[in-house]
Amino acid sequence: MLPIERSQKILEWLECEGNLRISDLSKRLKVSEMTVYRDIKPLIEQQKVIKTSNGVALSPPIKKPAYACSYCYKESNTRHSVQIITIHQQVEQTCCLHCGLLYYSEIEDKVSQILCKDFLHDTTMSAKLATYIIGADINLNCCQPQVIAFESMKQAKQFQKGFGGEVYQFSNAIGAIKQIMNGSCPCTDKVKVDNNNE
């Protein structure tokens, strides 16, 4: 079994059992305790698990202030915020469509609905039915690249004529954001740095 597969197994077991001893992990994975320590080191660095006196446990969820973005932890009580409703009827907020679409891509199998607002009319709509402009020449004070939602393709194309950017449907917008960002996210990287300084 590869180290990444062992790490995934460790996370699965911790999800079910809460915490585990290193010796138990060693027996289950059929590897030495030293190998287990090497496998959990990246998980600790990624803040997915913490060391305990008896072994390892899942990291406690980061407490975020009310109205904080579930993705970047910025204030999400704005006109551009997105609501993600999980299959367990829990409502998650993000500060903007950029974060909303990226967060959706991470928890897609747990999402019942994703809602956003039309940029022109401020009406609530299903984000899956929206048309998006990414990279328009307008400053919304949101995460980059900025993403704007429109109820119709016609409205998006008209907006694009004046402000530029590229037009996408829901299925392609997430991939476009990831490609533009090239695997990095300045909004979440900044928050991780800030949290480490506290």
Image (cartoon, rainbow, N blue to C red):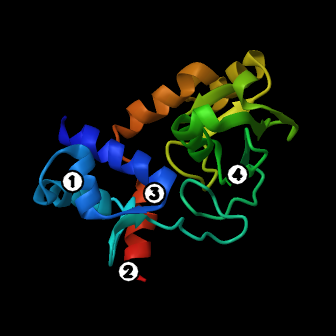
Q: Are marks 2 and 1 in contact (CB under 8 Å)?
A: no
Residue 20 occupies which quadrant of the picture?
bottom left
Of badges 4 and 1, the one in the foreground is 1
Of badges 2 and 1, the one in the foreground is 1
Of badges 2 and 4, the one in the foreground is 4
As drawn, the label of residue 197 is: 2
Residue 120 occupies which quadrant of the picture?
top right
Of badges 1 and 3, the one in the foreground is 1
* Amino acid type at mark 3: Thr
Q: CA separation, marks 2 and 1? A: 34 Å
Q: Is residue 89 above or below residue 153?
A: below
For the residue pair 127 and 43, the one nearer the viewer reads as 43
* Amino acid type at mark 2: Asn
For the residue pair 146 and 194, the one nearer the viewer reads as 194
Q: Is 186 on the left or on the right of 94, as rendered?
A: left
Q: Are marks 3 and 2 in contact (CB under 8 Å)?
A: no
Q: In this figure, which residue is indicated by the disc labeled 3? A: 188
Label 1 residue SS = helix
Q: Name the spot of residue 97 as percent of width and height, x first.
A: 64, 42
